[in-house]
Amino acid sequence: MSDGFSLDDALGGPDAQQSHGQSLNNPWGAQNPGQPGQPGQQYPGFPGPGQQYPGFPAQGQQYPGFPGAPQGQGQQYPGFPGAPQGPGQQYPGFPGAPQGPGFPGAPQGQQYPGFPPGGQQYPGFPAAGQQYPGYPGPGEPSAAGARAGPIVPPGPKKVPCELPLPSGCTAGMMLNIQGVPTGKRFSIDFVEGPDIAFHLNPRFDERPNVIVRNSMIRGNWGQEERQCPKFPFQMQQAFKLQIIFEPDCYKVAVNNENLCKYPHRLKNPAGIKCIRINGHVIINDASVTMV
């Protein structure tokens, strides 16, 4: 190497400077003939100023496809419900105030789909007055044939009167009467169409006083029954009478004492549709219940 030669001298000429500049900007030599010559581009397809990568979202977007203000002001994610779709929504499809609280499409007062409306404790909960689902209402027969509550409500009755029995007689049905005799005789009849299944007839106009029991079938009275251990009624004095329908007979009690039994002569208890009270008696209270 000769004296006085330096690297600066070797690179001092204009051509050298131009070649040197190209080497600094592109250490691999001249640009590829296919590269764009646009200012600020580092390679073909390089994003313009302000873009971090190809497809980078525009100003105000947090990621590609992020909803901008025109699509839904204040949206948190694509499809997030904005104010026009339902204020106060927590997620897509969440029910807004117009749909009712609870769940989409919920009626007012329901907490979840199928939840019973107000006043019911669970789906199928019985209505007011029922003790359990399917429990019969007052006077209605249950699956076993029994009834709940009074069949005929209590209260005074104007004589003559009829107490309806829509479902006829069943075992355990009881007639309750509180009254006062006022004359010669009165009667209580269990009526089956034109027939009388059971006729109970206290008589003050016979000596001795007697309680006649009988049945009328196809227009004809049968053999009377008259024997009783006592005659418990007194004129103008209150009494309490009970008649219980049993599978084989009627049981009669007066003033809480068993008085007599009367066997069934008609065999269709479901056909007994009313109890008829007639004669000289005041009925202060009469009802039909199950025991």
Image (spheres, grey):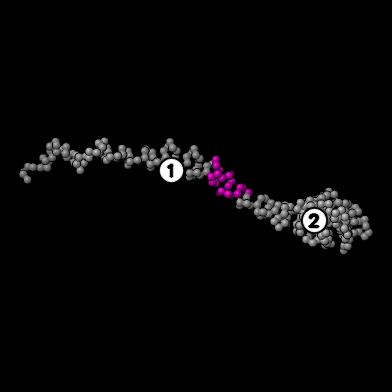
Location of residue 108 in the rendering, given as x and y in whole percent from the top left corner: 58, 44
- Which residue is drawn at the image coordinates 86% and 51% (left, top)? 278
Q: Is residue 291 left or right of residue 96?
A: right
Q: Quadrant of residue 178?
A: bottom right
- Could one spot residue 216 in this view of the protein? yes
Residue 262 - label: none
Magenta span dominant secondary structure: loop
Q: Is residue 219 left or right of residue 38?
A: right
- Mark 1 / mark 2, whichever is N-terminal: 1
Q: Is residue 102 magenta?
A: yes
Number of marks present in the image shown? 2
Residue 241 higher or lower than 89, as above or below: below
Residue where numbered disc 2 is placed: 175
Task: Tell me the quadrant of the picture where the N terminus can be found.
Answer: top left
- For disc 2, the neighbor class at 10 Å (few under 14, some 14 to 19, many from 20) is some
Q: Which residues are magenta?
A: 98-119
Location of residue 5 in the rendering, given as x and y in whole percent from the top left corner: 8, 42
Task: Tell me the quadrant of the picture where the C terminus can be found.
Answer: bottom right
- Which residue is drawn at the image coordinates 81% and 52% (left, top)? 193
Q: Nearer the viewer, residue 159 or 2?
A: 159
Q: Residue furthest left?
A: 2
SS at badge 2? strand
Q: Quadrant of residue 8?
A: top left
- Could one spot residue 188 in this view of the protein? no
Residue type at tag 1: Tyr
Residue where numbered disc 1 is placed: 77
Q: Quadrant of residue 249?
A: bottom right
Q: Is residue 170 magenta?
A: no
